[in-house]
Structure formats: structure tokens, C-alpha cells
Image (cartoon, grey):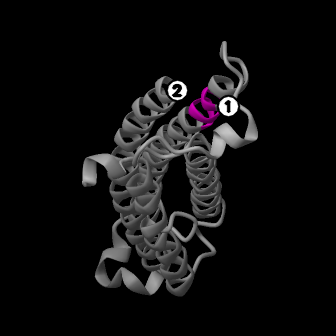
Amino acid sequence: MERIVKKYLQKFRKVKEEMNRWDELQSRLLSQFRNASFIIERLQVVQNPKSYGALKFIGGIEDMLLRKQMESLETILLSANKTLEEFHGIVIFLEKSLRDGRQLVKGGSIQATPKQLQQRIGIKPSLADCLDGLSLLHEIHQSEYLLKSSIISALSGLALKLSSSDLGALQQLLVDQPNVPKEEVQFIFDIVFAEEIC
């Protein structure tokens, strides 16, 4: 059993690296969202003929500015979708880690009994703790990825219809990451790496 727990600890070290990458992607996606929001708010001004004053006599300026803003928005949304693909890659990694973790318990040369799953070796976590931790990490990050995808999709599909307050509310959802409670994620790592903390 101790050998299997060590394998789980190796998995969790890799998972922790991916959680750091998740945080980096979160910062990038927020920046992309803010940039897209600025352009969307600017589009409302660009589409208003009163915004041009004396410039309205320059032929085609409204169309040219609108086209440039739309091109910039499209570029940012493409970048945001690439960031979402990276988030999805982490979710797939977590799913594979969970599947491999279950396989360690079920398909190994020694199949663990329910009692063995709960058994602790010193201060190391039990196999059940490891499996539950992997399962929870996968579940909360998958939910968060789906939420992020929905927000970016809404931004793409409704860009010209969103008000400033709509954009603010969507941005707040991204900032809060409601499906990834930091304390809960940290608690899972604290349980698994208890021996390193002591």
C-alpha cells in the first residue's frame, strides 16, 4: 500500500504544477476579457454618429473605425479561445490523473479492500483521501472551465448587445472563479502533503 501512496504523491506533485499553470491562465484570460470589454464599450461610441463631430465629414471614417475595432475584438477573442483550450488541457490532465489513480487501486497486482483504502501509513494520506482529492479537483476545475467557456461564448455572441453592467457582471464571474474555492484546493494539497508540512 505504501508504494501506491507514493505513486499518488507523485501524481499530486504534477497536479500541483498544473494548478499553478491554471492560475497563470486565469490571469491571462482576465486580461483578454478586459481588453475585449474595452473594445465592446468603444464600439457603442464608434457606432454613434454624434461621436464624430467635425470628423464625420471624412468619408468612410465611421466604417473604417468600426472595422478596425471589430478586427481587434476578433483577435482578442481568438486568443481567449486558445487560452480556454489550455484550460481544457488541464481538465483533461486531471481527468486522466483520476482515471489512472482509480486504476492504481483496482487494476494493480494487489487490489485494495475498502478497509485498506481508509488505512493510513504514518502521516501519509489514505488511498481514499488521494482518490477523493483527485476527484474533487477534477470536478471543480471542469465546472469552472465550462463556466469560463460559457462566458467567452456569450462575449463572442452578444458583443454588440452587452451593456457595461453586463460586462462587469461577466468579468466578476471570471475573477471570482466560483467553482474553484482556493481554500478547498489548498486543503486537498495540505492533506496529501502533510508529511512535507510537518
Please state which of residues 189 and 145 is positioned toward the viewer in this rendering: 189
Q: Is residue 8 visible?
A: yes
Magenta range is 95-101
> Residue 146's image quarter?
bottom right
Place of residue 72 in the rendered image (x, y in percent of width and height, measured from the top left): 40, 52
Q: Is residue 97 above or below residue 119?
A: above
Q: Do residues under tags 1 and 2 come within 8 Å of each other at their CB atoms?
A: no
Q: Residue at x 38, y 56 (%)?
A: 190
Q: Residue at x 64, y 57 (%)?
A: 143
Label 1 residue SS: helix
Mark 1 Cα-neighbour bin, 10 Å: few <14, some 14–19, many ≥20: some
Place of residue 4 in the rendered image (x, y in percent of width and height, measured from the top left): 52, 26
Q: Is residue 173 left or right of residue 118?
A: left
Looking at the rendered structure, which numbered label has been put on residue 102? 1
Please state which of residues 158 and 105 is positioned toward the viewer in this rendering: 105
Q: Residue at x 62, y 35 (%)?
A: 98
Label 2 residue SS: helix
Give amino acid for label 1.
Arg
Please state which of residues 91 and 32 is positioned toward the viewer in this rendering: 91
Place of residue 194 in the rendered image (x, y in percent of width and height, measured from the top left): 35, 52
Instruction: Tell me if residue 103 is in the magenta stretch.
Output: no
Looking at the rendered structure, which numbered label has been put on residue 110? none
Tell me the residue that label 2 is attached to: 4
Q: Residue at x 49, y 65 (%)?
A: 184
